[in-house]
């Protein structure tokens, strides 16, 4: 899409449902803030109609949203994991989870229930949505819940992000830990909000009124001139008559 010229951009003050107010530009004064496509800078996809991007940091956790459509995928070849422990794990733990061989993984683009797009949902290369997720047994799900609850009891104060993650894990355990997960954290929801109001500010480059064109004098109106001439002639005739009367009286 070709960017509009700066002299064609119109300024608006826009209020979002998060309470923030931003200034945005549209192409001309007849293009309104809530009827233009807004691009999600994370996925480079359009936001749902009526939403706009808030640049403020609201410090809220990314909410988990259900996947409603698996739209496309890209298969990538991954090298073996390094032998050195990663992510702060000890050698014994790392050796149990390390992938020592190259492997293929599919990176999916999905559409979420909130209307946003999420990239990089990872599955096995040969997995397809119609296969459905793999589940653990009910017994294993119960064990996972018990293990996690005991581990969480050791934690201190929790942040909103911690609670958000734990709620997600509990939901997944209730579903017997489906893989791939049917819900993912939507980062876009932290910044995309509904437009609730807007106010005109004016052109980005103020427009000056064109200089007034001097009006050309009106062309004479023939009937008006003839009327004036008739009046003058009548007055002249009246004066001549009076002169004749004066001359006759003097004789």
Image (cartoon, rainbow, N blue to C red):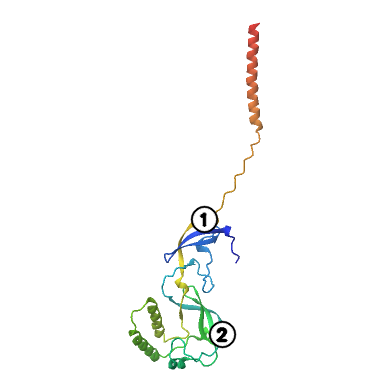
User: What residue is shown with label 2?
Assistant: 76
User: Marks 2 and 1: in contact by CB < 8 Å?
Assistant: no
40 over 165 or under it: above or below: above
25 over 225 or under it: above or below: below
Question: Which residue is pictured at 46% across the width and 66% down the height?
Answer: 194
User: What residue is shown with label 1?
Assistant: 202
69 over 193 or under it: above or below: below
Question: Which residue is pictured at 47% across the width and 61% down the height?
Answer: 14
Number of callouts? 2
Residues packed near mark 1 inside 10 Å, few (<14), some (14 to 19) or many (20 plus): some
Q: Position of residue 147 (x, y in %)?
A: 36, 89
Residues packed near mark 2 inside 10 Å, few (<14), some (14 to 19) or many (20 plus): few
Q: Between residues 124 and 212, which one lies in front from this camera angle?
A: 212
Q: Position of residue 119 (x, y in %)?
A: 52, 78
Question: Which residue is pictured at 44% across the width and 92% down the height?
Answer: 91
Q: Between residues 174 and 81, which one lies in front from this camera angle?
A: 81
**Quarter the N terminus occupies:** bottom right
Q: Between residues 26 and 177, which one lies in front from this camera angle?
A: 26
Question: Which quarter of the picture shows residue 28?
Answer: bottom right
Quick one: label 1 or label 2, which is nearer the N terminus?
2
Dot 2 lies on which element? Answer: strand
238 over 80 or under it: above or below: above
Q: Position of residue 173 (x, y in %)?
A: 40, 85
Question: Which residue is pictured at 64% across the width and 15% down the height?
Answer: 241
The mark found on residue 48 in the picture is none
Dot 1 lies on which element? Answer: strand
Q: Position of residue 231 (x, y in %)?
A: 63, 24
Looking at the image, the residue that sits furthest to the top is 251
């Amino acid at each position: 899409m070709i960017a509009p010229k700066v002299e064609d951009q119109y300024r608006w003050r826009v209020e979002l449902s998060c309470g923030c107010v931003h200034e945005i530009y549209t192409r001309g004064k007849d293009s309104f803030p809530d009827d233009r496509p807004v691009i999600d800078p994370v996925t480079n996809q359009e936001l749902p109609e009526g939403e706009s991007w808030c640049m403020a940091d609201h410090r809220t956790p990314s909410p988990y949203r259900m996947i409603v459509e698996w739209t496309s995928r890209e298969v990538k070849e991954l090298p073996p994991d390094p032998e050195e422990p990663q992510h702060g794990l000890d050698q014994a733990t790392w050796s149990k989870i390390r992938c020592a061989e190259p492997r293929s993984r599919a990176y999916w683009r999905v559409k979420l229930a909130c209307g946003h797009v999420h990239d990089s949902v990872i599955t096995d290369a040969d997995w397809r949505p119609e296969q459905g997720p793999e589940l653990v047994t009910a017994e294993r799900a119960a064990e996972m819940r018990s293990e996690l609850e005991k581990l969480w009891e050791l934690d201190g104060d929790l942040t909103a992000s911690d609670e958000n993650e734990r709620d997600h894990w509990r939901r997944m355990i209730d579903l017997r830990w489906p893989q791939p997960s049917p819900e993912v954290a939507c980062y876009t929801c932290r910044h995309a909000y509904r437009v609730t109001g807007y106010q005109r500010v004016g052109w980005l480059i103020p427009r000056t009124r064109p200089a007034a064109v001097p009006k050309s004098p009106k062309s004479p109106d023939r009937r008006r001139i003839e009327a004036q001439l008739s009046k003058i002639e009548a007055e002249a005739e009246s004066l001549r008559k009076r002169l004749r009367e004066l001359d006759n009286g003097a004789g």
